[in-house]
Image (tube, rainbow, N blue to C red):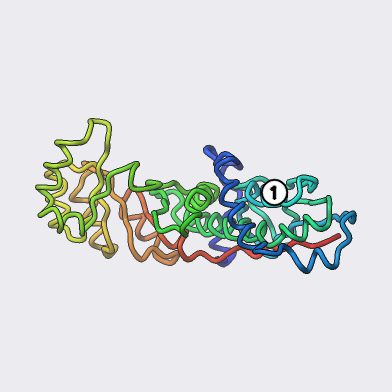
Amino acid sequence: MPPDDDYRGGSRDADPAGAPHPLLIEPIVRRALEEDLGRAGDLTTDLLIPPGRTAHAAIVARERGVISGLVAAEIAFRLIDPGVHIQRHLRDGEPVSAGAAIASIEGPARGILTAERVALNFLSHLSGVATSTDALVARIAGTGARIICTRKTIPGLRLLQKYAVRCGGGLNHRFGLDDAILVKDNHIAAAGGLGPVMSRLKHHLGPMVKVEVEVDTLDQLQEALALGFDAVLLDNMSVAVMRQAVEITRRRAKLEASGGIALERVRAIAETGVDFISSGALTHSVRSLDLGMDFL
């Protein structure tokens, strides 16, 4: 969790547009529940809790953050027992303070206990993504740059992680290999250079498809601009070199800064004038938000 002076919550609309449909989320949650239930189900709960017992509980934040993943948590409880009822006190994309209740739960005690860990796993992890995104977005406020995520996602969780980035005020880069063209260094090496790359792309792509290319030197940037690439990813460049790249480009292409994006230097990167700043750490190594469920 970033220090308080680096944190900004609640500055975006709650329930961001494009929230995944529950039908798309359910298979992800179902697999997690199947993994947890194993071959014999919840031995502890089934042995200790009578079938007819009901309970009331609350999901509570142990620290400040931005919420994401409530729909996944709700699906986890519903799949275990449709009799479990959840009342949201916050919506995805909203800030939460330490000690605040995020949702109230009531219904069969067995269902609540069995689904608890999977529900909290989704909610804590996705809220961690949203909170970390929020911190980066806050740090670059007023610069005109936007924070975006990458394909460096946990296998099986990309749909939800990218949604959590939007909850935190960020934008999504491509979802997969099939929805945009991003030419990276190994593509260039295998294809024989930027010239052959652009020649092949122009021959096969329609006029509505945008093409981004990765470069790591200013000479490569000059070549990419001459060939007419729509966007250029500046890979692991220093702030000083990024500033030169912006001056060279003169708005002829969108510029994306990538590599080593940290809270301490993201403002300096944004102030170079790049359009986008992409961070893989938002999804591949984020710390979960500390949440818990308390029986009342």
Q: Position of residue 223 (x, y in %)?
A: 12, 50
Residue 25 as seen in the image, left or right of residue 284: right
Specify the amino acid type for callout 1.
Leu
Q: Position of residue 48 (x, y in %)?
A: 85, 67
253, above or below 158, in the image = above
Look at 21% across and 58% down and name the residue there.
Answer: 185
The extreme top residue here reads 207
Residue 232 as seen in the image, left or right of residue 126: left
Residue 296 as seen in the image, left or right of residue 18: right
Residue 71 visible to an observer of this rendering: yes
Question: Crowding at label 1, few (<14), some or many (≥20) Cα neighbours within 10 Å?
Answer: some
Q: Position of residue 119 (x, y in %)?
A: 67, 56
Determine which residue is flagged by label 1: 79
242, above or below 86, in the image = below
Look at 60% across and 41% down and name the residue there.
Answer: 22
Say which of 35 and 100 sits in front. Answer: 35
Look at 86% across and 63% down and name the residue there.
Answer: 49
